[in-house]
Amino acid sequence: MITVEQVRALAMTLPRTTEHLIRDRVKFRVGSIVYVAFSRDETEMGFAFPKEERAALVASEPEKFHLPRESEMRFNWVECRTAALDEPEMRELVIDAWRMVVPKKVAAARLGDL
């Protein structure tokens, strides 16, 4: 199980990240683009994820991942149950989500050439 505190510890090390509390939900974003957000009760975490790959992700582990509600399907977004994630998997998801919203040169400077 992962917590908001674990995600915060990682996210705040990623360049250009800011944290916001919007309608009682913790969100991490770069500029105006949210790349990780928690449900109010912090039992679910949404994160940026390529639209064309999300059906496969959800199908691979439906007990862990699910599609966002219908009104959010237009976004590059997937949601997961925080109780089902371990820290290494959370790190991978958060970093990949962040990489989707920053310029390639910013990601390369932080993570090395990928």
Image: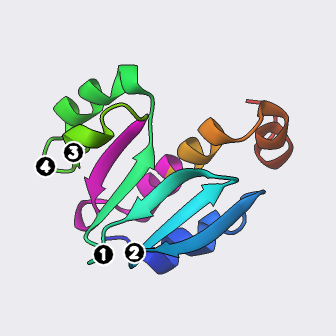
Between label 1 and label 2, give the one nearer the viewer: 2
Secondary structure under tag 2 reads loop
**From which residue to which does the magenta span run?**
76-93
| Label 3 to label 4: alpha-carbon separation | 16 Å
- Sequence-first disc among 1 and 3: 1
| Label 1 to label 3: alpha-carbon separation | 15 Å
Question: Which residue lies under the disc numbered 1?
Answer: 40
Q: Does the magenta stretch include residue 26?
A: no
Relative depth, front residue between 89 and 5: 5
Amino acid at circle 1: Arg
Position of 86 with respect to 12 (left or right) is left
| Label 4 to label 1: alpha-carbon separation | 20 Å
Check residue 23 in the rendering and tell me which mark sits there, or answer none.
2
Instruction: Classify the position of the C terminus by image quarter.
Output: top right
Question: Which residue lies under the disc numbered 3?
Answer: 69
Amino acid at circle 3: Arg
Q: Which residue is drawn at 56% across and 42% down?
A: 96
| Label 2 to label 3: alpha-carbon separation | 17 Å
Where residue 102 appears, x then y in whole percent?
Answer: 72, 41
Q: Is residue 86 magenta?
A: yes
Check whether the beta carbons of the residues at disc 1 and disc 2 lie within 8 A of each other: yes
- Sequence-first disc among 1 and 2: 2
Check whether the beta carbons of the residues at disc 3 and disc 4 lie within 8 A of each other: no
Instruction: Classify the position of the N terminus by image quarter.
Output: bottom left
Relative depth, front residue between 106 and 112: 106
Question: Which residue lies under the disc numbered 4?
Answer: 63
